[in-house]
Each structure stands twice: as C-alpha cells, then as structure tokens.
Amino acid sequence: MKTVNGTEYRMYRREFLNQEGCESTASVFATVNKTTSRKKWDYCDLTLKISDCSRMISLSFDVGDEKERQNSLKKVEKLQDVLAEFKRALKLEMAVARTRDKHEEEYKKREKEEKSGKKKTKKKSADQDIIDWINEDED
C-alpha cells in the first residue's frame, strides 16, 4: 500500500523501460487506487500508461460492475499474450539479425543472385538460409 497526495494505492509503480545509458525516457506507469472505503459510485482509477520519447498511451480498466471487471481482466490477459508473442518474435528477429551480421557477405551474395534470377532456390529464401544458419549455430 502506498499513499500519494492523500490517495491510497494498492499499486503505484513507474519503471523506465530502457537500459541504463540509453537516452530515451520510455516508461510504464501503473496505478490501482484503493477503493475499500469508497462508495459504489466513487471513481476508481486503474490505469496503465506506456510511453516512449514523445508518445504515450493510457489504458483504463473499469471495475464498476461485473461486466466491466471481466472486460478489464480480459484486456490485461490479452496484453500479456500479445507481449509474450512479441517477445518471442523479437528474440527470433534478434537471432536473424545477429546471424545476418555474422554471414553478411554470403547473405548479400545469395540475395543478389536471387534478385537477378541467376540462382533459383526452390525451397528457401535468403531469410530461410539465415534461419538455417541460426539453427546450425545453436548445434
């Protein structure tokens, strides 16, 4: 429990998203104010704010009635699912980029051959070759 400007919060957390040394002020800020002593019609502030250098989104999560509560929970679960999938795709793209860096000359040669039509690859593209290289590197 935390009190800020006279308001009690069940959760009040702000975290910077970038590693130390990065110039951006990207952050996530989440608040859930305590409503135990409030009347049913009082406003409840449950927000999640995500920002990068110059943009911010603010998501609200309503708990006024059971339908709103279930919808708010669904929103959080959907965000978790999307972020988990995004993380997996990011890790794959990072591995592809690392492998591309490692095999840059060979990749450029294959890409040029494919574009010029000199080399016909039936089963895979240059990107598929990179994925194969990643798998080779992991062995």
Image: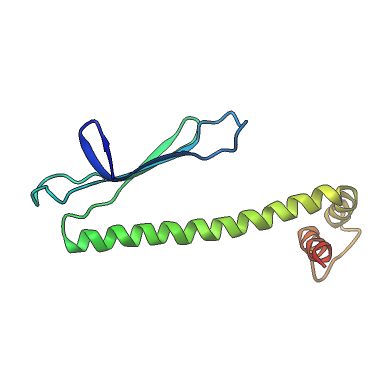
Identity of the residue drawn at 47% across and 62% down: 81
Question: Which residue ends up furthest to the bottom in the rendered image?
Answer: 123
Image: 40 above or below 25: below
User: Which one is in front, 130 or 12?
Assistant: 12
Looking at the image, residue 47 sits to the left or right of residue 40; the answer is right
Q: Quadrant of residue 126?
A: bottom right
Give the colour scheme shown.
rainbow
Image: 119 above or below 44: below
Looking at the image, residue 118 sits to the left or right of residue 90; the answer is right
> How far from the left and from the top, in percent, is residue 45?
24, 44
Identity of the residue drawn at 47% across and 30% down: 54
Identity of the residue drawn at 47% across and 38% down: 27
Report the quarter where the N terminus lies.
top left
Q: Quadrant of residue 3?
A: top left
Count of labels shown?
0
User: Which one is in front, 118 or 80?
Assistant: 80
> How far from the left and from the top, in percent, is residue 63?
21, 55
> How far from the left and from the top, in percent, is residue 70?
26, 63
Identity of the residue drawn at 23% across and 52% down: 62
Q: Quadrant of residue 64?
A: bottom left
Looking at the image, residue 39 sits to the left or right of residue 93; the answer is left
Report the quarter where the C terminus lies.
bottom right
